[in-house]
Structure formats: structure tokens, C-alpha cells
Image (spheres, rainbow, N blue to C red):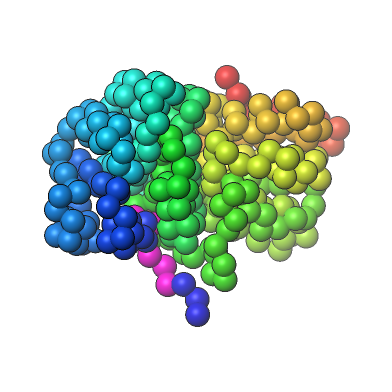
Amino acid sequence: MLAKPRAMRDALLDKIHKAMASDPTIFFVSADFGSPILDRIRADHPKRFVNVGIAEQNLINVSAGLALEGYKVFAYAIAPFITMRCFEQVRVSLALLSEVRPMNVNLIGVGAGYSYVVSGPTHQCYEDITLMRALPNFQVMSPADHVTAESLFHRCVDELGPKYLRLDAQVLPVIYTDTAPNIANGFNVHRRDGAICLVATGYMLHTAFTVADRLLARGMQVGVIDLFDLARFSEEKLRGELRRYETVVSMEEGFAGRGGLDALLYNFIAHNEIAAKLLNIGVEGGYRFELGTRAELHEQVGIGPDVVTRRLLDLSNLSGKSVKNINSGLN
């Protein structure tokens, strides 16, 4: 039976709710952010649920304190607020402290990229991958559908350390219809074709499939990889995959050339002596205040299927030119 599309947060919260019935060490903390499933968690486990209000700094410190008492903590808020509003607390109370004290805190940020499309740049989140990757002992996970999101639950409860899960706020099509991806690998190969490989994370995996289909209709095959674990993927296996290609294309719903997925792949390719060149696809320019659909905004900032397809067709037509010449920069 094919999985019915669900919101990522609902799928993950369901797993947490069910586990709390048998695991008394799971604690849930929310920053005045709710859902029907969260109402059930609060009703069924009132002694292990706290709403700290609109106070994300306090959310982090309360979560750290609970973790030091031995709880497996899930902290829940809107993505830009649980990362940027309280970044100092995340750094000191979680990243630093977890290096000297065992603790398990899982930050659930809802609203990755442009998924809160009508709320504008204050609620959209283009910087979280960069910020959370800057903390060396943080796990950063970026699923592309609800099947992957709920599959990450066991990573959250079974492993110590601070983790950040960036979830889309919208209900996205199901990618893993038959079986969940291998979480231990940290990535999943969907297509293994041609000289170019699209490595996407989060929502951009859906764009990668659209682009790959359009290129195939023009006789151009490309590989597609879902990199959903941005910290602990299997380096050996990913190295083996990327060595097949002449060009690797990073695709992220975040600013290009600002330390996100493109920087991750740039360093990985360089340190592993992979011959492939890198083309980075990410949000170009600054903040945008225009209203529109997510698809419209993506085309405006350079990450929509139309503009990405054109860039890859231009790339395939280049003769004797380095891909580096058309990169948007990896500062």
C-alpha cells in the first residue's frame, strides 16, 4: 500500500507520541507552537510536556537542563526561530556542553526554506544549514518527505548529542513509496546516469526529479542523490558514487555560496580527491519581500525547475570550459 502524503511534523510527532507511552525518558518542549498531535502528547503525558511560550532562548536552556537529568528531549519551534533567535544558547548550552556532559536534545525546526511562503523572509529559512553545520558536534538532518522524517526518529532517541531536524511545513509528495531510505548511509541514490549528478537536500530533491525528467526528455541523463544527513553520511559510499561523474550539482533551498550544502560538497570533493567539478544551485541575491507561490519565488531566486534546467542545458553545451567559470561562488 502506497504511503499517503503527510506533513513531516505530523509523521515525526506521531512516532514521538507513540514512543512516549513506553519510554518514560522522552520529554517534549514547545515554544508556543502547536498541532493536533501535539495536543494529544500534552493530554496523554502532561508531566513530560512543557510549553515555554514565545521564548526560544528559554526553550534551549530548559531542554539542556532536562537532558542533563537524563531525558531524551525533543524541542519544537519554527525553523528560523529555533536556530537564529537562540543561536548563542544553542552553541553554549547544547554544542559546547554536550562535549563534556552526555545529553540528547533534538531540535525540530518546521518551515525550512520557503515553506512558509506567504509569511515572508522573517519566517522563511535560508540560513539554517549554514548555521547548524558551523557547530562541529551537531547532527543536521534534512528530509525530503514524511517517510524519511519519521525514519529519523530512532536516530534521535538512540544516539546521544545535539541534533537539528529541518522539516518542511508543507505536505510534500511521497518519495519513498516502497521502503524508507537507509538512514545509516545518510543518502539515497535514486538515479545513476550520465556525466552529471544532482545532489539535493530537503525540498530541492523534488525539484531535482523534475529537472532530471525534463533533461531526459531532451536526451540528457543525469544522476540524482538525496543527501538527507548533512553531518554523518557514509563518506566512503558517497565518495564511490560521486567518482562516477564529471560534474556534481548541489541543490539547496538556501543561499548559494554561504556555507551550506555547496560548501559541504566542495570540501568533500576536494578532500577526497574526486575529479568532478562542482556547480552550486542555491538562492541568489538577498532577501525577497515579494509575495507569490513557492514555485514562482524559486524561479525568481534561481532554484526553480525552469532556471535550473536552462543552466544544466547550458552546461552540457559548454565545450572545453571549466564548470568553475559558471559557479555563483563558494566564498
The image quarter in which residue 70 lies: top left
Q: Is residue 14 left or right of residue 281?
A: left
Residue drawn where x is 14% and y is 53% of the image: 46
Instruction: Tell me if residue 304 comes above or below residue 131 in the rendering.
Output: below
Q: Is residue 7 magenta?
A: yes
Q: Is residue 242 visible?
A: no
Question: Which span is picked out in magenta?
Answer: 4-9
Residue drawn where x is 35% and y is 38% of the image: 105
Q: Quadrant of the C terminus?
A: top right
**Residue in front for this viewpoint, 18 or 120:** 18
Q: Residue furthest bottom?
A: 1
The image quarter in which residue 214 lies: bottom right
- Percent position (x, y) of residue 275? 81, 32
- Percent position (x, y) of residue 313? 71, 47
Residue drawn where x is 55% and y is 62% of the image: 180
**Residue in front for this viewpoint, 324 or 248:** 248
Instruction: Tell me if residue 61 comes above or below residue 115 in the rendering.
Output: above
- Percent position (x, y) of residue 142? 48, 45
Q: Is residue 311 left or right of residue 10?
A: right
